[in-house]
Amino acid sequence: MRSRILLLLSIIFVAASQSTFSQHGNSSQVKFIDSLLAKDSYHVELLGFKRKVPVVQSTGSVQVNRNANVVTFSTTDNNLKFLESLKIDLQNEMVVFRNDTLPFLDEVIMPASSLFGEWNGYTWLKTTSNTDQNEVIIIDKQTQKSTQLDLGIVKNTNKILLRINCKEIVQGYSKTPFSIACYLN
């Protein structure tokens, strides 16, 4: 069973790493993110999930810092410290999270049936693997990492959704994934 799961994860990682990232020169992304993060500070609702329904686990506040075209965050709340390792580069349309640079992937338009309800925004994704495109995959030797960040606005609540998913496999073993979602308002 473990080998099937690892094989499936390997296939997903390899497929994602081979996809072509579309670098849009479209300034609508920059305008959207810029208007989304226009306030100096936000109330943050850190989400957990009960039966696949988002519920607020804790709350706090975060400061938005702007330096030219770069947006960073600062907080005194220990539950939100992960936000301090997030940097949004509006000029280059990329995100840096935990020193990983995530290129822009695509615009996202999610239906009302999605986990967070109807929302739209943008996604950044970085996937790395130690396997070449034509190489045979050996599960025990797989080392892969995937980091995805979604940022958008939920239609019904008008709250900003920030979702980060990090998955890593080292020598065929899955490390504990980092997955977090929160609302900013």
Image (cartoon, grey):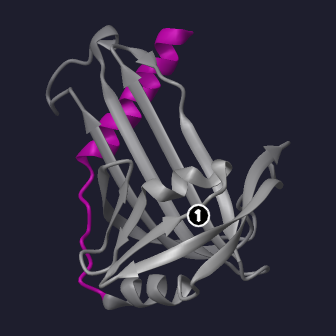
Where's residue 176, x and y in %?
Answer: 54, 26
Residue placed farthest to the front in the image? 76
Asked if residue 31 is positioned above or below residue 161 in the image, the reply reads below
Q: Is residue 147 above or below residue 121?
A: above
Quadrant of the image for the N terminus?
A: top right
As drawn, 68 above or below 103: below
Magenta-highlighted stretch: main secondary structure? Answer: helix
Neighbour class for label 1 at 10 Å: few (<14), some, many (≥20)? Answer: some
Residue at 74%, 70% in the rendered image: 112
* Image-based side of 23 in relation to 1, left or right: left
Q: Is residue 52 visible?
A: no
Q: Nearer the viewer, residue 177 or 39?
A: 39
**In the image, residue 19 lies in the stretch drawn in magenta:** yes
Residue at image position (62%, 54%) is 80
Q: Position of residue 104 (x, y in %)?
A: 33, 66
Give the quadrant of residue 60. bottom right
Q: Is residue 167 magenta?
A: no
Side of 48 relative to 104 (left or right): right
Instruction: Tell me how many marks there are.
Output: 1
Q: Which segment did they paint magenta?
A: 1-26
- Amino acid type, label 1: Leu
Under tag 1, what secondary structure?
strand
- Is residue 108 visible in the rendered image? The answer is yes
Q: Nearer the viewer, residue 108 or 72?
A: 72
Residue sitting at x 46%, y 35%: 167
Indicate the position of residue 122 as horizontal and vertical percent values. Answer: 46, 71
| Residue receiving disc 1 | 162
Left or right of 42? Residue 92 is left
**On the rendered image, what quadrant is the C terminus found in?**
bottom right
x 48%, y 23%: residue: 175
